[in-house]
Image (spheres, helix red, strand yellow):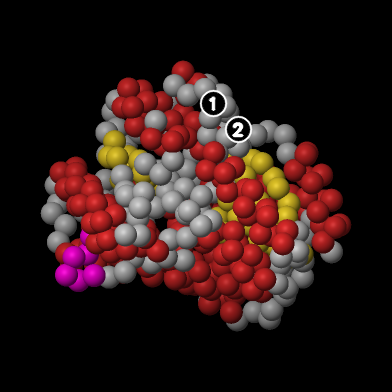
Amino acid sequence: MRDVKEILKDLTWIADNPRACLDEVLAEGKKAVGVMPYYAPEELVYAAGMVPFGLWGADMAVSASRQYFPAFYCGIVHTILELGLTGKLSGLSAVMIPLTCDSLKGMGANWKYGVKTIPIIDVPYAQNRKIEAGKAFTTAKYREILEKLESISGKKATDEDILAAIRLFNENRAACLEFVRLAPKHTDVISALARSRVLKSRTFGDRARHTALVRELNEALAALPECTKGVPVVTTGILADSSELMNILDENGYVIAADQVAYESVELRYPVPEVPADPVSGFAVRLAETEGTSVLYDPGKKRAADLKDLAKEAGAAGVIWVGTKFCDPEEFDYVPVKKVLEEADIPLLTLEVDRQMVNFEQIRTAAEAFKDAVQ
């Protein structure tokens, strides 16, 4: 059995080298489809014989994208477009753009005008996602998406192909969730940064390979004695993969006991159900069941109550709100979340991050002060 450090090295390399991972896919003669956030039916890409490739932007300065979006715009969208405009995503056969927020709804037209070599596939879904009419609408749209993917790949996806893809991706979700459960029990070997890299690495390249690596890691962790030293917290937000942010949490002895992050456990907690009679309908069911995120219709703000329960179950000393700068859906959710946590006497640290940030000193100071307050 390999030790934890060796396995983490492999997973960290994948997370930190997305372009190299894409080149590996292309060198194998496979086609890749870029998948922007959030909750796109990646399994349909796989069922059509291609590889889904996560596009969540990058920590970088932008210049070309400023011709299309104002400076006060979502950094995730800005940097994805920058990568496309500067040729960093060359080789992709298409990009999928879920229409889950206003920023992404404006992405398609700008992408089509600026990145002419990579076609787009819009991914619409019903806002009223829980009612039967909403599920039927989403299912119909996803069937159209599958047809577009098949035309790109030249492969017809059978129901068996779709079910096999669903099974593969659900297995990956389960392995990652087991890692999320084990990580806070082994704080001597799993830092906040390492945890982030393990979860981020699943979006690049072959999902079966990633599942095998995470299962190997879980087995190695389970064989070690437990170590729970640190200040347990729950993170929430859209994205929390900044190396600088994770290093600050590690410097201050924070342990991510659980998370409600769209890029991390929110995506993992909701597998696609297998519906043999109509496999595509399973994606609409999953979308209807997903909770804990600001970009899906949530009139009762169930996210707040779920976060409170998650913090209590994890024994967290507090919650860290990792706010994505200029993200309206997140800002709308902040008030009800803050209210519910205050009523439950759960401390809340509010941080604001951006893909283009270079100075993290305010975040460092806030993290130090919060640690002193909750210890």
> For residue 319, what is the image quadrant?
bottom right
- How packed mark 2 is, by other alpha carbons closer than 10 Å (few <14, some 14-19, many 20 or more), is some
Residue 159, percent from left and from top: 17, 64
Q: Which of the two residues, 96 or 292, is positioned nearer the viewer here?
A: 292
Q: Residue at x 44, y 51 (%)?
A: 296
Numbered circles on residues, count: 2
Q: Amino acid at mark 2?
A: Gln
- Secondary structure state at the residue bearing disc 2: loop
Q: Residue at x 38, y 70 (%)?
A: 171
Question: What is the span of residues highlighted in magenta in the rendered image?
Answer: 275-280
Which mark is drawn over residue 62?
1
Q: Residue at x 57, y 75 (%)?
A: 220
Q: Residue at x 32, y 63 (%)?
A: 285
The residue lying furthest to the front in this view is: 300
Q: Is residue 263 visible?
A: no
The residue lying furthest to the right in this view is: 372
Direction from residue 300 to residue 110 in the image, left or right: left
Direction from residue 282 to residue 193 in the image, left or right: right
> For residue 152, what is the image quadrant?
top left
- Secondary structure state at the residue bearing disc 1: loop
